[in-house]
Image (tube, helix red, strand yellow):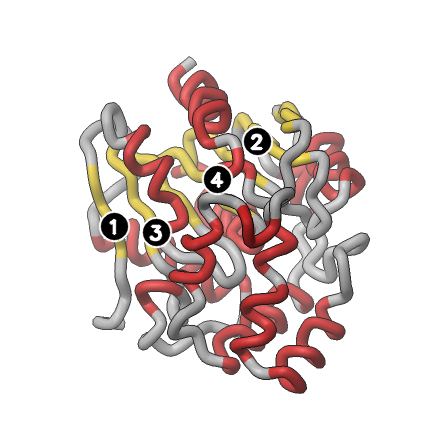
């Protein structure tokens, strides 16, 4: 996969950032700038997405997890902290299932354990149907607006626009299939890693029941709720988000 983009910056104990559906490596820009002062920050663009839009996309969460592990292995990194957003939160749960002994601390952000995503603003099948009917341009302008309280008026919305510029219909649909066919709920009780769960109380992609399920079933976990934030807390309140994670990973 020579067309894969991975941002690797900073020095110190590694922090791996895994973006979500229609995301990119660039969407972690506020976290890279902050955490690279004391950590080595690894933020890949998943195959088919963002800066890796020319790479062949993957159609399962397990394949995406193995892709991330392989890229970490290529960099000869053994142990690391792991943060996943949305679909990336599913991926990091899967990584923990495959290589949990290598994960120091786990952060599940705006995500859940059921790929069907109960309570989402629309079902995954409805998103797939609209994607095929309306095409990528309309779909990619419609969905990301729901990730901010201020919609496309948010100062960081441009990051979403940049991320989807070259994403194909096949890549978007493969990711929706991957999420729909995945479930991590039965494995939650086996996660031994210290885990931080983050959720914005205005998130219409993942409702409270989703994050509550994570918190109740992962034994060594805690839940932090951001008020007046939607799906992209890391962009809406980046300073507070970054400070929270710093306190968690260096304690």
Label 1 residue SS: strand
Q: Looking at this view, is 201 or 151 the one in front?
A: 151
Residue that numbered label 3 is attached to: 26
Q: Residue at x 60, y 33 (%)?
A: 198
Q: Secondary structure at mark 4?
A: helix
For marks 2 and 4 on the same chain, the one whose residue lies earlier in the sequence? 2
Q: Depth-wise, is mark 1 or mark 3 nearer the camera?
A: 3
Residue pointed to by mark 1: 7
- Residue 196, disc: none
Mark 2 or mark 3, whichever is nearer to me: 3
Among the two numbered marks 1 and 2 on one chain, the one whose residue lies closer to the N terminus: 1
Residue 242: x and y, percent? Answer: 43, 27
| Of the image marks 1 and 3, the number of the one nearer the N terminus | 1
Residue at the disc numbered 4: 235
Quadrant of image for the N terminus: bottom left
CA gap, disc 1 and disc 2:
29 Å
Q: Position of residue 153 (x, y in %)?
A: 55, 49
Rounded to the nearest angstrom, the CA distance separating label 1 from label 3 is 9 Å
Query: Pointer 1 and pointer 2: residues touching (CB < 8 Å)?
Result: no
Q: Please report whichever mark, 4 or 1, sits nearer to the chain's N-terminal start.
A: 1
> Residue 214, relative to residue 176: is it above or below?
above
Quarter of the view holding residue 162: bottom left
């Amino acid at each position: 996969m020579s067309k894969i983009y991975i941002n690797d910056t900073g020095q110190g104990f590694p922090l791996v950032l895994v973006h979500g559906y229609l995301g990119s490596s660039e969407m972690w820009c506020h976290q890279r700038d902050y955490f690279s002062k004391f950590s080595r920050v690894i933020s890949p663009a998943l195959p088919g997405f963002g800066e890796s839009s020319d790479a062949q996309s993957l159609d399962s969460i397990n394949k995406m997890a193995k892709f991330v592990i392989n890229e970490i292995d290529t960099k000869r990194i053994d142990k690391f902290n792991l943060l996943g957003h949305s679909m990336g939160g599913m991926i990091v749960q899967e990584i923990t299932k495959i290589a949990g002994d290598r994960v120091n601390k786990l952060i599940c952000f705006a995500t859940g354990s059921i790929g069907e995503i109960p309570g989402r603003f629309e079902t995954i099948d409805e998103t797939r149907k609209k994607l095929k009917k309306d095409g990528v341009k309309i779909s990619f302008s419609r969905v990301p607006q729901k990730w901010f309280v201020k919609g496309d008026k948010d100062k960081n919305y441009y990051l979403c626009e940049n991320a989807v510029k070259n994403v194909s219909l096949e890549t978007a649909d493969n990711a929706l299939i991957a999420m729909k066919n995945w479930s991590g709920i039965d494995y939650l009780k086996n996660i031994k890693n210290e885990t931080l769960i983050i959720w914005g109380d205005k998130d219409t992609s993942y409702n409270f029941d989703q994050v509550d399920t994570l918190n109740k079933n992962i034994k060594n976990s805690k839940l932090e709720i951001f008020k007046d934030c939607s799906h992209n807390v890391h962009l809406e309140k980046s300073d507070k988000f970054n400070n929270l994670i710093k306190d968690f990973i260096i304690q």
